[in-house]
Amino acid sequence: MEPRRHTWAARDGDRGTESLLAPFFLLRVGGLPVTAVERLRSSRTLAWAREVLRSESALAEQAGPARDALGEAVGATNDPGLRRELLALRRDVHNGRMPRDPARAGELADLLGRSDRVAVATWLSHRDAHEAALSRGDDVLAEERAEAVQHLRQLADDPRLRAGIQLGAPLLDRQLDSYVADPGGRRAHKVERSLLSYAFRAACKTSPFSTLTPVALGRFRDGGPALVGSDTAGARPVRPRGHARLNLVAVARLAEAVVADPTLRADLPVELTVGWRVERDRVRYLRRTLDRGHDDALVTPGILHEREYHLNRGPFLDDLLAVAEKEAPIPLGELAVRLSDADPRNRPLPVVERYLGQMLDYGLLVIPVLRTDPHHPDPVERLRADIASLGHSWSDSLARRLERVGRHVSDFPSADIARRRDTERAVRQELDAAQDELGQTPPRTPATAIYEDATVGDLAAWADRERWEQRMLPGLRGLSELLPVFDSRLPKRLVAREFFRLRHGAGGACADLVGFAQEFHDDCFGRFLAESPASGRFVDGPDGAEYRPQSNPLRQPELDALDTARKRLAELVDARYRDLPESATELCLDDDVVSEVAGLLPGDRAELSPHTYFVQVDAEAERAAVSWIYTGLTVPLSRFVHGLAEAGEDTLASDIRTHLADATPDGAVFAELSGGHTMTNLGLHPPVLPYELVCPGDVSHRPAERRILVDDLVVHDDEDSGRLRLWSRRLGTWVVPVYLGFLMPTALPELHQVLLAFSHASIAGLDLWNGVSAPPREGGAQRRPRISYRNLVLQRRKWKVHPDDLPRPGKRGRVPDARWFLEWTRWSDARGLPRRVFVAPDTRPTAGRRGGPRVAAVRKPQYVDFDSYHSLCQLENVLDTVGDTVVLTEMLPDTEQLWLRTPEGRHVTEMGVELDIRPSAPGASGRSATRRR
């Protein structure tokens, strides 16, 4: 389907913009239906708790007349003993306490006048009934707990839950068989607690992980009956299909073992790193070094650093450069012999071999055969074939082991639980044995050997294009105008441009990109990165929120403008918040707020502003709650393309290429930035961009004509767009870097971080409450309403509370469980909390109210259902580890508002919708219009 563009009318004299809605979206799906954990709710215990609370309320109303009657009786009697008894009974009534001797209390009531006797007798009667109701709680809860444990044992055998647990918690997986067989075992409570955590995660959260949260592809189409839907969900349950990969960190450990052995590395073909050059008496290049991580590192083998390096020239180094440049790739051992034979007397072979080993360590020489191809459908198989082609006994043995590993990994997703366990063990054994053969002892295989994403290929999810254009796009378009306020990448782009202008002049150019990047990082960028996280935001202080200006090392008015816009947004939200009635649950922003704040932003108007909005949709209300905002250009989708293709979406890569071609700014090309890390699963995807940027230390597997070497690029200060840009001399066009990996920018090596200043990457974390007046505490909790804009919920309702202000009466286990549940029900009802929330530690940098700040051990939001005894037990465990303040955020949409319904029940979903915005073409009408392209 061809994409549509939409042109909006200009605002306040600015240029109009046109927006491209990607024709597809990523759908995250809860692996279990929420009905699976609804059966863990304590409905009868909750009904009992509400009955007790109503009884308490009635007792409180009846206590006044009874207390007054007893007070009059105390004043009327002259008998000291009787007075003491009446006073004791009056205190019991005042405190709502059951008298020690109920029979004597009845006798005392009979001594009173008729009306007074009725008041006291009524209170005593209700107090008896209240005590009877209280006594029933433990039996009701015990019965429901037993039912919940039985259901939990059934969930433990669900392959969707079990497969995810197997990867995420292998120890728990091994314990579950015995737990299911004997739920009353010695370790049952600990196993139950962990199992509950995974069950709630699979049913209620949307972070992709194996079969706990699979993903599906959805497409926009015309004529849908609702905002979003599925053609097949009503006919079949969600059955995820796994897509497994070997953890590439394990491959990196093998490569390290090969390179560490001088005999083995002599067989490896080497070549010179990209971008080296001779400058008079020195050789200059960018050296890449790896700070190796812990043996249990899961994501990358370590942290990459890049730094410009110089080697003094001499005959030996000149010969090395000449031979390696002419005959690359050349085996390291052969290169050593060639260099030694050129001057045997002064170049003994052992000395040459040690020197070449140093050149590998220094990064002048690289080994392409040990680099994986992140664009290959099976990078490990590609690597295995390259290693096998070396034709040596050790490489043949390693290739055979990698082949067996590949077969095991391929079998892993479709295997049953027992076979998956055996398969994972077999993979580890092969990797350990391979390292042992290569001389690496003890083996350094990472804790997680296999990664698995899961897809639902038969969901046939769709969204109605016209409804989205009318209901959702206006809100997303307006929200995009506010995002520069929150974009942590924008200040970095602005600082990079100003630094360049100071060095090369306004409108200047620089042909030495690597030199500029090194100078920028050393003189400015490194310090700016260190200062930025604590700047450009309000920080809670003793006198309220205090604004810490954006770090501004070059005294730029653009960064001052960002500060002004941030403060003005806080003022506007604060003014509307103060005008809200106390009982209001929602604060609505309007176009006036958006226009005023957007008008204060610096003039850096990107030629393209791409964002992916992860939203949770209430299809019936035609509203969406914004959860996260990422860079667009299909970045959040890239990781899953291979898996979705296996699940039937075989045209997806081609569709992405078409979309990216349509989103490319006029007169420019997109070029992929590798991020420097090849041994990570967070960068695997098909080639979807026409070119690849090849940085020093990179090894590209793309055809030569599809590579853009860094040396080919010239940095320009484009005064028309107000941006730094890269010009390719070979292609004669502008080049826009695009990073499609999932590593955070701060985890990338230095040159790649600087190159992101030429990209359209953004990281925008919405925090509209930053700088807004703190609400009053109600029962120890600070309540914030929702913030909405048009049909979008930008911030969900939330409550901030110190753990000491939560209802923890001596903690569970020190009071009867039913009474403990009753106190949580009382607390949540009194504060108007929704029944389902997510709890997380407060991330604001404030000192603790009681004894200073505490560090949170649990950082990710944890699901809490106040109707479930077991969920509240999970909450207690979280509260034991959190920091100074916890934040409870409403679940929105709630479980009854979920649109995806299968025969098993309702599923939590989250859509990743991409909207790319850029200035409209000259001559655009300025009115709402669509055109096909």
Image: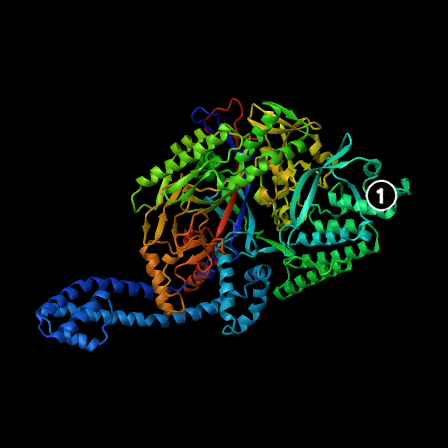
Q: Which type of secondary structure does the marked residue at label 1 adopt?
A: helix
Q: Based on the displayed image, in which of its 4 quarters is residue 633 positioned? A: top right
Image quadrant where one finds the C terminus? top right
**Residue 912 placement (x, y as % from top left):** 52, 44
With respect to residue 372, does 561 lie above or below?
Answer: above
Across and down, in percent, residue 830 comes to: 31, 56
Here the colouring is rainbow
Q: Is residue 514 left or right of residue 200?
A: right
- Residue 796, compared with residue 872, is above or below; it is above
* Position of residue 901 in the picture relative to residue 685 (left or right): left
Percent x, y of residue 117: 12, 70
**Foreground: 451 or 674?**
674
- Tag count: 1
Q: Quadrant of the N terminus?
A: top right
Residue type, numbered disc 1: Leu
Residue beneath the point at 42% across and 49% down: 847
The one of 61 and 670 positioned closer to us in this rendering: 61
Q: In the rendered image of this protein, does residue 924 appear above or below residue 215?
A: above
Asked if one can make out residue 407 in the rendered structure from this viewpoint, the answer is: yes
Structural crowding at the residue carrying mark 1, measured as other residues with C-alpha within 10 Å and reported as few (<14), some (14–19) or many (≥20)? many
**Residue 688 x/y as whole percent:** 64, 40
Q: Is residue 610 left or right of residue 688?
A: left
Residue 589 visible (yes or no): no
Residue corresponding to mark 1: 335
